[in-house]
């Protein structure tokens, strides 16, 4: 889950905003002959058949000058870490150093790129330029214009560009589902969902919703309950001899052998683990999110750094969304308290929410551990790009669920399936 993000890059006045408008079929981006009209990145959503919702990000021209212009360029380059694919726009067959630098940066982050020669109604794309770009950078080059002679030609041009956009999004890699590969038809999954002050009013948190839907999509059975209901539920599951011909239910104490897996909110790990028999696999929504979003192996290695934390160490807590906090906030209150109790020392915590800028590399290396939330509100690529910088700075990283499982002593059980 997560909306795909497409970044639109190019110098000032190469027609980035016009391109967005024509893709969306409406005037949403300001178009002007004045260079530098687009300042901060502008985000607009659209729906692409077979892909789903995507977000177009119109960025400031990367040739902007002056002190303010440099800040705009900095924001433009930051967008590269947040996107799933890019359109790099140029015109007049001029693909210079700045375009090449941006293309190299996109390649560094493994972002699929479509190079768009815009304003081709004024200056047609030179075949030699297209061939050089294709051969040197292994990227698609598309000729385009927002001012084709007839509506039919305009639609054909848009359809052609959309086909390359779809190709790029498919190359960016699909999102794994939270229960991918775990559900067979008829499997019974018990999902433990506490309703406390941290639960959003009137709804479940997104990983819980994702798990329920994934189980149902694959023909499984999702039994949803709260922690205090779990013991009674497991004891009350009928055995075959008690319930007659119930296909798929096997005999056993309380019939619990019919349960394929118990998945719990991380905050209830300790309570739930004391109720669920060892014969039933147990994990958390957050561990499943780590598996779906990754990088799972980095998380598995990073959690061991908890054992080496000492007084005064700095811990970086990475949230992927912004939200109001409370006294029961998992990332800002409960996990810091758990860690300090486990380590018996006073730690320093830094909190970064959303996809806000990480500290510079030299400051990142000061941290002894980084903790990433499940990442349900971002794409797999966005999360991977963030974690890549943390790992490059030599900082061990794990996620909320793995951390909680570790400090509560059930890490091996919670990750045994994976």
Image (cartoon, grey):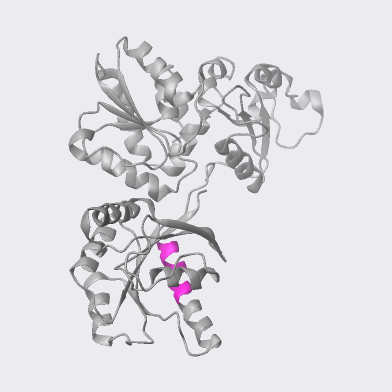
Q: Residue at x 40, y 25 (%)?
A: 403
**46 is higher (above) or lower (below) than 274:** below
**45 is higher (above) or lower (below) than 2:** below
Q: Is residue 166 left or right of residue 302?
A: right
Q: Is residue 90 visible?
A: yes
Query: Which one is in front, 151 or 60?
Result: 60
**Residue 166 lies in the magenta stretch:** yes
Q: Residue at x 55, y 86 (%)?
A: 151
Q: Main secondary structure of the magenta part?
A: helix
Q: Quadrant of the C terminus?
A: top left
**Whole-percent x, y for residue 88 in the image:** 33, 68
Residue at the extreme bottom: 149
Q: Quadrant of residue 397?
A: top left
Q: Is residue 410 visible?
A: no
**Whole-percent x, y for residue 42 in the image:** 43, 57
Q: Residue at x 64, y 27 (%)?
A: 257
Residue interval drawn in magenta: 161-171
């Amino acid at each position: 889950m997560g909306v795909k993000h497409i970044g639109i890059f190019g110098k000032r006045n190469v027609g980035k905003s016009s391109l967005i408008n024509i893709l969306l079929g409406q005037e949403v981006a300001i178009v002007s002959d004045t260079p530098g009209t687009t300042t901060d990145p502008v985000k607009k959503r659209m729906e692409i058949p077979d892909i789903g919702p995507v977000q177009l990000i119109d960025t400031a021209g990367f040739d902007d000058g002056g002190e303010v212009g440099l800040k705009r360029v900095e924001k433009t380059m930051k967008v590269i870490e947040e996107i799933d694919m890019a359109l790099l726009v140029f015109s007049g067959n001029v693909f210079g150093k700045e375009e090449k630098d941006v293309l190299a940066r996109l390649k560094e982050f493994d972002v699929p790129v479509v190079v768009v020669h815009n304003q081709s109604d004024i200056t047609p794309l030179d075949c030699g330029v297209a061939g050089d770009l294709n051969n040197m950078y292994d990227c698609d080059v598309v000729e385009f214009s927002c001012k084709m002679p007839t509506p039919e030609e305009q639609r054909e041009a848009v359809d052609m560009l959309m086909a390359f956009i779809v190709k790029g999004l498919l190359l960016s890699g699909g999102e794994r589902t939270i229960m991918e590969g775990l559900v067979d038809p008829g499997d019974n999954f018990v999902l433990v969902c506490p309703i406390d002050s941290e639960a959003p009013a009137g709804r479940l948190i997104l990983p819980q919703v994702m798990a329920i839907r994934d189980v149902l999509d694959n023909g499984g059975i999702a039994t949803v309950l709260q922690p205090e209901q779990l013991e009674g539920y497991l004891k009350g599951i009928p055995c075959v001899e008690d319930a007659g011909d119930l296909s798929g239910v096997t005999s056993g104490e309380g019939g619990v052998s019919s349960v394929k897996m118990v998945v719990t909110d991380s905050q209830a790990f300790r309570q739930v683990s004391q109720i669920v028999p060892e014969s039933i696999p147990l994990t958390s929504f957050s561990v499943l999110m780590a598996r779906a979003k990754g990088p799972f192996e980095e998380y598995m290695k990073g959690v061991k750094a908890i054992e080496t934390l000492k007084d005064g160490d700095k811990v970086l807590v990475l949230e992927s969304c912004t939200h109001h906090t409370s006294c029961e906030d998992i990332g800002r209150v409960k996990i810091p308290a758990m860690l300090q109790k486990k380590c018996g020392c006073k730690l320093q915590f830094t909190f970064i929410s959303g996809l806000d800028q990480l500290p510079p590399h030299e400051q990142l290396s000061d941290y002894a551990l980084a903790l990433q939330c499940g990442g349900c509100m971002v794409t797999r690529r966005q999360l991977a790009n963030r974690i890549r910088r943390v790992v490059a700075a030599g900082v061990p990283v794990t996620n909320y669920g793995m951390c909680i499982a570790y400090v509560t002593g059930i890490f091996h059980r919670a990750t045994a399936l994976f």
